[in-house]
Image (cartoon, rainbow, N blue to C red):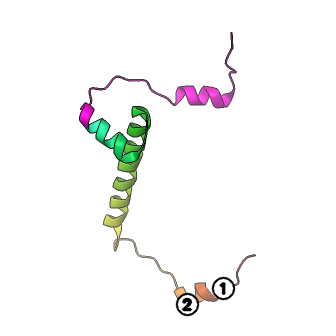
Amino acid sequence: MLVPLLTSISISFILNRMRTTLDLPEELVEEARQLLGFKSKSDTIIVSLRELIRHKRIDELKKMAGYIKLDIDVETSRRRKQIK
């Protein structure tokens, strides 16, 4: 019998996973799975949620355009010494 190693990484991995039951339309999950090219439903849902969050964050940043005043001298910053 294999005994799992309880390292900080494995414990963190276990604690950061949530097992749950969801009532999802099968045809919606299947279409997303095929479009994304995954075999598992879990991977499909995880990637879909990450993409949704990413898109929402991008939208929030776009809404901020013009509201943040940056006082940057572009010409001076272009002439600064390059760090190698």
Relative to 35, does residue 4 appear above or below in the rendering? above
Q: Residue at x 39, y 46 (%)?
A: 36
What predominant SS class does the magenta segment belong to?
Answer: loop
What secondary structure is found at the residue carrying circle 1?
loop
Magenta-highlighted residues = 1-27
Q: Quadrant of residue 21?
A: top left
**What mark, if any, has residue 75 been given in the picture?**
2
**Disc 2 from disc 1: Cα separation:** 9 Å
**What mark, if any, has residue 32 been given in the picture?**
none
Question: Residue at label 1?
Answer: 80
Q: Quadrant of residue 20?
A: top left
Local packing at callout 2 (Cα closer than 10 Å; few below 14, some 14-19, many 20+) is few
Q: Residue at x 69, y 14 (%)?
A: 2
Q: Quadrant of the N terminus?
A: top right
Residue 35 % position (x, y): 35, 47
Local packing at callout 1 (Cα closer than 10 Å; few below 14, some 14-19, many 20+) is few
Which mark is first along the chain, 1 or 2? Answer: 2
Residue 34 % position (x, y): 35, 42
Q: Quadrant of residue 22?
A: top left
Residue 47 % position (x, y): 42, 43
